[in-house]
Amino acid sequence: MSTPSSAPDGAGPADAGILAAVENAPSVDGAPGKREPGRAGRNLPAAIGVGVGLGLLVTVPLFSPYRWLFIGVLVAAASLGTYEIVSALRRLGAAPPMVPLVVGGATMLVLAYTSGSEPLFLALALTVLACLVWRLADPAEGYLRDVAAAAFTATYVPFLMGFAALLTQGPDGPRRVTAFVATVVCSDVGGYTAGVLFGKHPMAPSVSPKKSWEGFCGSLLACAVAGAVFFATLFDANPLLGVVYGLAVVGTATLGDLGESMVKRDIGIKDMGDLLPGHGGLMDRLDSLLPTAPVAWLLLTAFVSVT
């Protein structure tokens, strides 16, 4: 996760110019891109403060007697994330319909929490269908582009987030969500720390030049340890299964981070927004969590008995 002072290894002058333009590009709502000095490119105090605040926003309703409040937090996050994605896609000329995406996303999360995985898939299909119908009111030009963007948004944000809602089911739901979110945080912290201290070899210089292989190794170590500890303490399960779980989280979290970076490179923006100081937009925090949620749900369901 080091920040090269010039073009990354293997990148030519043209690549360097593109990367420099994106690093200084505005976020989707016109706010300046992040330009804080430092090897990892973050305003660390602000990032820590926002991270603690987000942690409280998740844990307080999750462990309260009113667990459904956590679903309200997910609905708000999905709505904001959908807004950021739609705003970004409009820079490419796409115009996915906002109303059916927000309403359908909220429906996905509520049904996942109350009724399970099958209604979640059904709600996704109905949301895409609603977008197809809603877009019929506009001119035919760009119809396929707009409905494809709508399908991407519905799948990427509320559908994947629906697996976090599935994790809350059952008496040990809060512990499962904790293991999911905390392991992703360990991936981020481990990668950040190792990248700042040792990062020299960019992992994907044309997509995310601050990501290094040394940082990835730090994420692997942090998540393997975290998975073993969480399985042993939260679920009284085999720590070796926790190591497998932790390594899987690293894979999906890293792919999610790189995937969103690829989207931002394609659009030509630095951040998805400026809602969270030191982080960017909300989607800049959800990028690792969203693709990890279904994997966490699948592995925790397979490895851990309901208690």
Image: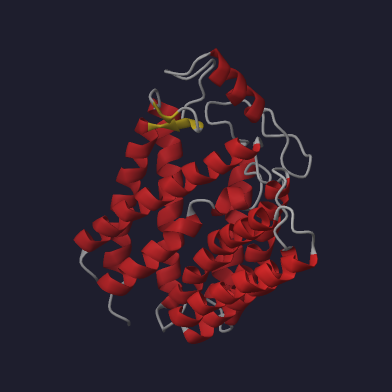
Q: Is residue 284 left or right of residue 95?
A: left
For the point 73% across and 63% down, the residue is: 98
The scheme the figure's colours follow is secondary structure
Where does the image place residue 2, in percent across and percent down from the top left? 47, 26
Q: Is residue 92 above or below residue 175?
A: above
Q: Is residue 238 left or right of residue 225?
A: left
Q: Is residue 152 left or right of residue 249?
A: right
Does residue 103 appear in this view? yes
Where does the image place residue 129, in percent across and percent down from the top left? 62, 73
Q: Residue furthest front?
A: 140
In this view, the residue in front, 197 or 265, is 265
Total marks drawn? 0
Where does the image place residue 222, in percent across and percent down from the top left? 34, 47
Quadrant for the C terminus in the image? bottom left
For the point 42% across and 46% down, the residue is: 255
Q: Is residue 174 above or below residue 184?
A: below
For the point 63% across and 29% down, the residue is: 23
For the point 57% across and 43% down, the residue is: 263
In this view, the residue in front, 255 or 127, is 127
Q: Residue furthest bottom?
A: 115
Task: Tell me the quarter of the picture where residue 152 sits.
Answer: bottom right
In this view, the residue in front, 115 or 185, is 115
Where does the image place residue 250, in percent across and percent down from the top left? 36, 49
Q: Is residue 190 above or below residue 109?
A: above
Does residue 234 appear in this view? no
Q: Is residue 174 above or below residue 39?
A: below
In this view, the residue in front, 204 or 276, is 204
